[in-house]
Image: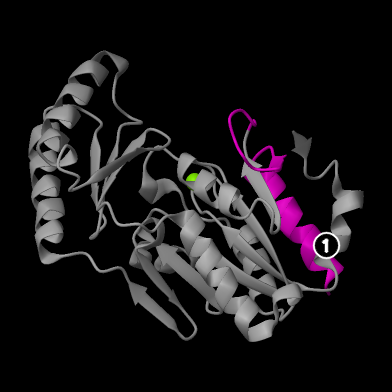
Amino acid sequence: MEHLLDSWPKLEGNFKDRVVFIFFDYDGTLTPIADTPAEATISQDVKNLLNKLSENPAFKLAIISGRSLNDIKNIIGLTNIIYVGNHGLEIEGEKIKFESQVSPRLKSIIKRLYENSVKKFSKIKGVLVEDKGLSISVHYRLVDKNDMQEFMRILNELIEPYIGRGKIKINPGKKVYDIKPPAGWDKGKVALWLLAREQFSKGENKIFPVYIGDDVTDEDAFRALANKGLTIFVGEPDKTEAKFYLKDTSEVAEFIRRIAALRE
Ligand SMILES: [Mg+2]
């Protein structure tokens, strides 16, 4: 697999004459993964770089996160960016406001699961149950490895009544399980939809899409955009379908710096 910065000379032409539409994941892409989600703040340097791109008409930016829409909007705090929360269930940007239809019954299942998770996991030190409105994240980064068997037992017990009947979906991430409604939206479908919207207004050949992410949920987007633009995995490449990789979040910042310089 090719390292993006090593392959720069043959790639930089892609960024020169079209609107570059960049989709960024957040955790592990724009900021290193932290012990808890609250600690994963964005550096002023990366924020300034994003701000610079967002003010340049040569770029279009979307941040696609598993966090709730409000959470990701507050963290980044810039205008002129499309924000996608809950892996695609919520979208907001200039002239866009979308919330996926989740039935009241499903919402009440998610709510009940959240309350039960908080209760049941309270006996295991280090579990963090996050209420994201339309979904729940159960973080286990701080759980002692001796408690993992019990953690998994409780998790299975909690989801078992719903998962068999297709009421919820569970996705493993980096030391986290996301429990969400089985709705059809994923990061790939959202990226394609946002791209199509932009192509419709500016012309199909005028947009060059780039997707950068580090997690399992980003693979849907790598597949969706495989033949349309540039797909970039962040981290040591192993089983990813992205075409290029960057080693870490500081290389992501370097990539942003380079494309910004090309269009100054
Ligand atoms: Mg991530």
- Left or right: 255 as drawn, with respect to 111: right
Range shown magenta:
236-264
Which quarter of the picture shows residue 6? top right
Percent x, y of residue 51: 63, 72
Q: Which residue is mark 1?
A: 14
Kindly identify the amino acid type of the residue bearing the numbered disc 1. Answer: Asn
Percent x, y of residue 134: 24, 59
- Left or right: 206 as drawn, with respect to 47: right
Examine the rendered structure and indicate whether residue 110 appears above or below residue 162. Answer: below
Q: Residue at x 38, y 47 (%)?
A: 37
Residue 256 lies in the magenta-colored region: yes
Q: Quadrant of the N terminus?
A: top right
Which is nearer the eye, 80 or 76?
80
Name the residue at the right extreme.
9
Q: Residue at x 92, y 50 (%)?
A: 9
Percent x, y of residue 160: 14, 33
Residue 20 lies in the magenta-colored region: no
- Label 1 residue SS: helix
Q: Residue at x 63, y 66 (%)?
A: 50
Crowd tier of the residue under label 1, counting other residues whose Cα lies within 10 Å: few below 14, some 14–19, many 20 or above: some
Examine the rendered structure and indicate whether residue 185 appears above or below residue 172. Answer: below
Q: Residue at x 64, y 63 (%)?
A: 22
Name the residue at the top extreme.
146
Residue 96 visible, this angle: yes
Examine the rendered structure and indicate whether residue 2 appears above or below residue 182. Answer: above
Which is nearer the eye, 175 or 100?
100
Q: How many marks?
A: 1
